[in-house]
Image (spheres, grey):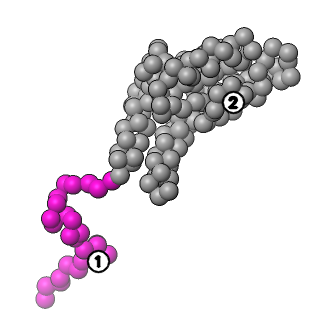
Amino acid sequence: MEIEQGRGNTPAESPFQRVMPGIVTASTDEVFALARKSSLWPLTFGLACCAIEMISTFMPHHDLDRFGIVTWPTPRQSDLIIIAGTVVKKMADPIKLLYEQMPDPKWVIAMGSCATNGGPYYRSYSVVMGVDHIIPVDIYVPGCPPRPEALMDGLLKLQEKITADARARKLG
């Protein structure tokens, strides 16, 4: 007696697979979001000790190239700015200028407690109480200074946000 192999829980073949094999359907927003999240070009703006941790995130030990994230030294081709360190009032205008020079869509990561809320210099006469008082921030990376793994997590969260925003535009 021969035992017949059952289909089990395998789904039936899609009619699209029979008619148009290899064709994917997606909205343009989703396709562009996939490209954007997989090719972030950050403009790194290191102001204090957090900059050392940010720099080490881009070194071979952590290898952000595998996520498609490559630093770019000019704001005119960058789509992400990472503010790392203490933002003093004297630096507010240059940060705002760099942000305005970036093409849309653009994102901002505030790295470290100084960039997010002033850090230990909270309520100092010369320190901005967070870079979000100057430019809109998408992701906050906490810590003093945050480890490179924390920045990597922030970058992955930004990639998730880019995808989620595209899906929200599709539904809305």
SS under mark 2: helix
Asked whether 165 falls inside the magenta stretch, the response is no
Vertical order, 16 against 72 (above or below)? below
Instruction: Please determine whether, in this image, residue 45 is positioned above or below residue 152.
Output: above
Figure check: 9 above or below 163: below
Which mark, by number, is residue 29?
none
Residue in view at x 29 percent, y 56 percent: 25
Q: Give the percent coordinates (x, y) of residue 117.
A: 76, 29
Q: Which residue is mark 1?
A: 8
Left/right placement of residue 25 relative to residue 127 reads: left
Task: From the viewer's side, name the closer residue of 78 and 172.
Answer: 172
Residue 4 coordinates in the image, percent (x, y): 17, 82
Q: In the rendered image, which residue does mark 2 sit on?
A: 132
Task: Give the residue at x 53% y 44%.
Answer: 161
Q: Main secondary structure of the magenta part?
A: loop
Point out the stretch of residues depicted in magenta: 1-26
Query: What residue sits 72% from the left and 11% below the top?
Result: 90
**Would you say the residues marked 2 and 1 are in contact, meaning their CB atoms lie under 8 Å apart?**
no
How much space separates mark 2 and mark 1, taking CA atoms?
54 Å
Q: Where's residue 164, x and y in %? A: 50, 49
